[in-house]
Image (tube, rainbow, N blue to C red):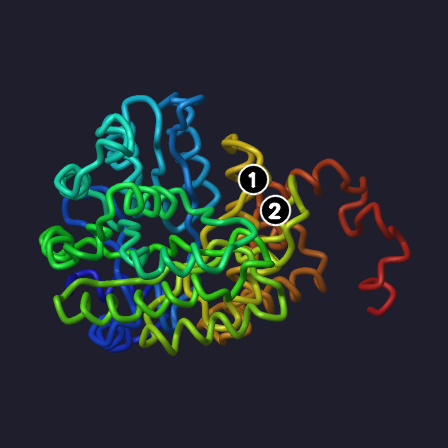
Amino acid sequence: MKKDIPFIAKSEKVPSAHISRGISDGTIAVFNNPLHKKVIPCAVGKGLKTKVNANIGTSQDYPSLSNELKKLEVCVEAKADTVMDLSTGGNIDKVRKEIIKNSPLAVGTVPIYQAVADAKGLQNLTADILFDVIEKQARDGVDFMTIHSGVTLSVAETIKRKKRLMGIVSRGGAMLYSWMLKNRKENPLYEEFDRLLAILKRYNIVLSLGDGLRPGSIYDAGDAGQIGELKILGQLAKKARKAGVQVIIEGPGHVPINEIVGQMQLEKKICGGAPFYILGPLPTDIAAGYDHITSAIGGALAASAGADYLCYVTPAEHLGLPSADDVREGVIASRIAAHIGDIAKGVPGAKERDLEMSKARKALNWGKQIMLAIDPVKAKKYHDKLSSKRKDVCTMCGDFCAMKVFG
């Protein structure tokens, strides 16, 4: 990992000592499994640019590998920072291996998905099957893994006592909750946490402690289940650091906009400043088809309040498996949110880009405006389609251009 520090520091515009200190105290994590030969090292955490993850992967209805490799190309072109392979259909091993082989971006997984598939159903799942899958994925070169170790029997009892509107919306969380109740056993990812840490340390994999009880409705945000799990994740994060395993914390979910800042601050307090990886958050439940916009609104506020890593949301969220076009829209929306957050946090280089854009607009320098845009492809498409025959103005204002009138 030490060899990656100068490269990361240069790309982040921070001193190498800042990266080293953050890794040491657990406020920065670096994604780089040595077995992922093509990966560009990526860091998340304190004082760094807010990163964006894109989820891809097959489903039972759409098991096509070629579709997911196309989505991977889109993620790279749209400048996502990482991808997660959430495959549940087709040849899961082959899909993962091909994604890792072709991805310069760090790759994450949620191993319990494949464990349940390999076991031919949740009823056949055992701890050994689950840990075998974790090790297999580690050997393939996975850089980070979402592990739902905080869904314990005690938390499950809380959920049973205090009914939620949406119950458990995390697939991994729901699987473990159901498995524990049927088998009357503790979550093996919690009970055998040391076994898990030994595997992750061996392959230099970042542990992403999953929020199995994230709220799936703004009405469930901040409830006893969510906060109870977060407290357990804080304890496990501390244990992981002591074992020499890098750790990040996953978070919500659906959260009313007036509660987002408080939830970001609470995670930092409970989890000792560990990097926070959030899905959204989405501050309203009624934007189906536009949840990439909802997510960007919540994500910008969350990033400004300390979130380090945004998981994208696409227009297809809550509706179905996203297409390649949906993936692109999701990545760009989350990158906008991340950049807005970086301006607020004072991340090196963030505000300077906006300064250059303002100068280019003042000078009516269309080429530079397009180059500086978060999505230059779309910016150029609109400009070419709507541009004036006169190169010194646009079709909106013409001779009434404020920049020309003002002088």
Residue shown at 54%/62% (left/top)?
221
Q: Is residue 341 above or below residue 203?
A: below
In the image, residue 237 sits, relative to residue 126, either above or below, namely below
Res 89 seen here: yes
Q: Which residue is mark 2?
A: 291
Identity of the amino acid at label 1? His
Q: Where is the C terminus found, in terms of image quarters? A: bottom right
Answer whether labels 1 and 2 touch (C-beta < 8 Å): yes
User: What residue lies at 26% left-to-right and 70% top-to-bottom?
Assistant: 235
Question: Which is more N-terminal, label 2 or label 1?
Answer: 2
Percent across and percent down for residue 52 are: 44, 53
Separation (CA) of disc 1 from disc 2 = 9 Å
**For discs 1 and 2, the disc positioned in front in the rendered view:** 1
Relative to 149, 279 lies left or right: right
Mark 1 neighbour density, 10 Å: few (under 14) some (14–19) many (20 or more): some
Say which of 206 and 134 sits in front: 134
Answer yes or no: is residue 104 visible. no
Q: Which numbered disc covers residue 318? A: 1
- Local crowd size for mark 2, using a 10 Å CA cut-off: few (<14), some (14–19), many (≥20): many
From the viewer's side, name the closer residue of 119 and 319.
119
